[in-house]
Image (tube, rainbow, N blue to C red):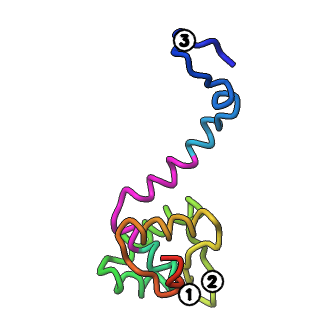
């Protein structure tokens, strides 16, 4: 542990010894970047409730297919959604990961919307 220049009478040794790495915090920052666009959050939220293609998603959110595809690429790169090819069509849905589920619940809690698939006791 580094010696701090000022001693304020607090013991930070444990916190400093167990502080996550810069890379760990960068992972959090990368996820929070996904929250920087309301349309992207809306698309992610929809994909938490359905598996859908770009064309239908575009119609659902009143955006062009290229714009939706851009958001899907970013969400997929962040590990928040997955894709599944079926013939010529590609379907997207939220990833079944703790990170995606936490973000899903956080979105709903922050804007106080009810998830149709979330039990009442968890709301």
Q: Residue under circle 1? A: 89
**Does residue 92 appear to the left or right of 38 in the view shown?**
right
Q: Which mark is residue 7?
A: 3
Secondary structure predominantly adopted by residues drawn in magenta: helix
**Does residue 53 appear to the left or right of 19 in the view shown?**
left
Q: Residue under circle 2? A: 85
Residue 12 picture location, percent across and down: 61, 25
Asked if residue 83 is positioned above or below residue 76 in the image, the reply reads below
Magenta segment includes 38: yes
Mark 3 or mark 1, which has the lower sequence index?
A: 3
Residue 96 picture location, percent across and down: 64, 73
Q: Which mark is residue 75?
A: none
- Which residue lies at the image location 49% right of the left edge and 61% below the top edge? 74
Q: Are marks 1 and 2 in contact (CB under 8 Å)?
A: yes
Secondary structure under tag 3 reads: loop
Residue 11 vs residue 102, the one in the foreground: 11
Q: What distance separates the C-alpha of mark 3 from that of mark 1?
A: 62 Å
Magenta segment includes 119: no
The mark total stands at 3
Residue 3 picture location, percent across and down: 63, 12
Q: What distance separates the C-alpha of mark 3 from that of mark 2?
A: 59 Å
Q: On the image, which quarter does residue 85 sit in? A: bottom right
**Does residue 36 appear to the left or right of 88 in the view shown?**
left
Secondary structure under tag 2 reads: strand
Q: Which residues are magenta?
A: 27-42
Q: Residues within 10 Å of mark 1 (few under 14, many from 20)?
A: few
């Amino acid at each position: 542990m580094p010696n701090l220049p000022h001693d304020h009478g607090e013991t930070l040794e444990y916190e400093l010894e167990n502080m996550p790495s810069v890379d760990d915090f960068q992972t959090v920052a990368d996820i929070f970047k996904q929250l920087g666009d309301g349309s992207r959050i809306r698309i992610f939220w929809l994909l938490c409730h359905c598996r859908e293609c770009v064309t239908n998603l575009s119609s659902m959110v009143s955006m062009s297919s290229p714009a939706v595809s851009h958001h899907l690429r970013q969400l997929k790169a962040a590990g928040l959604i997955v894709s599944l090819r079926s013939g010529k069509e590609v379907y997207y849905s939220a990833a079944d990961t703790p990170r995606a589920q936490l973000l899903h619940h956080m979105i709903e809690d922050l804007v106080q919307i009810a998830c149709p698939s979330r039990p009442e006791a968890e709301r």
